[in-house]
Amino acid sequence: MTHSFFQPPTASRYALRNLRAPRCLVQADLPAGAAEDLVAVDLLVDGGRIASIDAAGRMPAELGPDLDASMVLPGMVDCHTHLDKGHIWPRQANPTGDGAGASAATMRDRTARWTAEDVRRRMEFGLATAYAKGVVAIRTHLDSLAPQASISFPVFREVRERWAGRVDLQVSSIAPLDIFLTGEGRQLADIVAESGGRLGCVTRSGRFPGETMPPDMDEALVQVFRLAAERGLDLDLHVDESTDPNARALIRVARTAVAEDFAGRILCGHCTALALQTDEFIEETLDACRDAGIDIVSLPTVNMYLQDRSPAGRTPRWRGVTVLHEMKAHGLRVAVAGDNCRDPFYAYGDHDMLDTFTQAVKILHLDHPPGDWIRAATETPAAIMGIDRGVLKAGAGADFLVLKARNYSEMLSRMQFDRTVVRSGRAIDTTLPDYRLLDDLMAV
């Protein structure tokens, strides 16, 4: 095993003593948390599951090591990624670094290169990386304009089966909103249903590419909701990912959900333009989202990279992220996620949700105090995905991360490269796949 700062005992039953865990993620009867919302715990593993969690100092020393206040976190959850796009940057960079350049570059690469084998290998490379980082569940969007959906969804189904037991995988489509006014949209909805996925799109129109609020939006939104309802599908939408304050699709999504009496889950990602609205309109929009039961995921690293980028080299004037504090205060479930990785939408990234959370804290000011914001990368995205992940509790699988860091200050200040990743009670090899494994796919 590489990098890990310690190895847990090899016995099937052992304890890790004197750990520190976020109180909000521990489901056990414990004393009130100490400073920074952390609690001191002993954790008993038996047969690959968490057998019990107790206050630190209560488990016998002979059961396992004293970890000197090291932090423990449940496996991380990434509810918004693009595994099909990942790692194409070396062969298809984004020369402008903005959203328009990203879309154009991705379309060129997708048209020329996205065979089943190409998508599968890059997808599995991303999964191997995320697994080594301690990610236990991922929802990926798949570019779905014909003919790509007929290529990528079968690949996803095969990969999901192959990775079962290591990473829980979910899928959503992504395509321009207006295709759902055509037969292609109905066919896509059928492919999504066949794949056990979520119906997704971006609130932009292929017929009106320059319009942030295209004239066919309301009609197309109604059709998306009805196609999903007919097939019993949840929705996962890219909404208002723009620097244009005229982009106001989120409130229309919410009102359409209420008007259609939609029974499924709705996750809306990005929503960056909302941060450019008046306080009154933000309040009105968040009221509508609460009424519709909409969940929100912010993609802070990618949106800070893309938004407000100037061809003249002007310093960006805003951080490019949505109003996450206000959303949470309104009672909406809010998550952060990794989004793109080494592709035209984001030149960087490593499928590491701990790094995503660390950067989100700094970009979105999720600190002073840290409170329960760690839930946004663990328990909350798991709840949004409808899976039982992201908490530490007796009876759950022993899938967790142990960090050398002893508190949030240490965790957020240094990259936790030496983390120990435990799956089913055993430390896994955290060696990352070498980029050289993709070299033959990068030839141009």
Image (cartoon, rainbow, N blue to C red):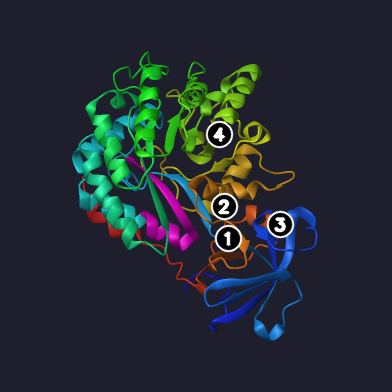
Location of mark 4 (residue): 293
Image coordinates for residue 214, horizontal then vertical, percent = 38, 16
Q: CA distance from mark 1 to mark 2?
A: 7 Å
Label located before the other in sequence (4 or 2): 4
From mark 3 to mark 1, how far is it between C-alphas? 12 Å
Residue 95: in sight, yes or no?
no
**In the image, what residue occupies the spot 40% across and 53% down?**
169
Q: Is residue 55 left or right of residue 391?
A: right
Q: Nearer the viewer, mark 4 or mark 2?
A: 4
Asked if the magenta segment contains residue 138, the reply would be: yes
Q: Is disc 1 surrounded by few (<14), some (14 to 19) or many (20+) residues within 10 Å? A: many
Residue 369 in the image: state x and y as whole percent. 74, 45
Q: CA distance from mark 4 to mark 2?
A: 20 Å
Q: Earlier in the sequence, mark 3 or mark 1?
A: 3
Q: Secondary structure at mark 2?
A: loop
What type is the residue that disc 3 sits on?
A: Arg
Span colored in magenta:
126-142
Q: Which residue is mark 3?
A: 23
Cβ–Cβ under 8 Å for marks 4 and 2: no
Q: Identify the amino acid type marked 2.
A: Thr
Type of residue at label 1? Pro
The residues bearing labels 4 and 3 have C-alpha atoms spaced at a distance of: 26 Å
- Answer above or below: position of 249 versus 362: above
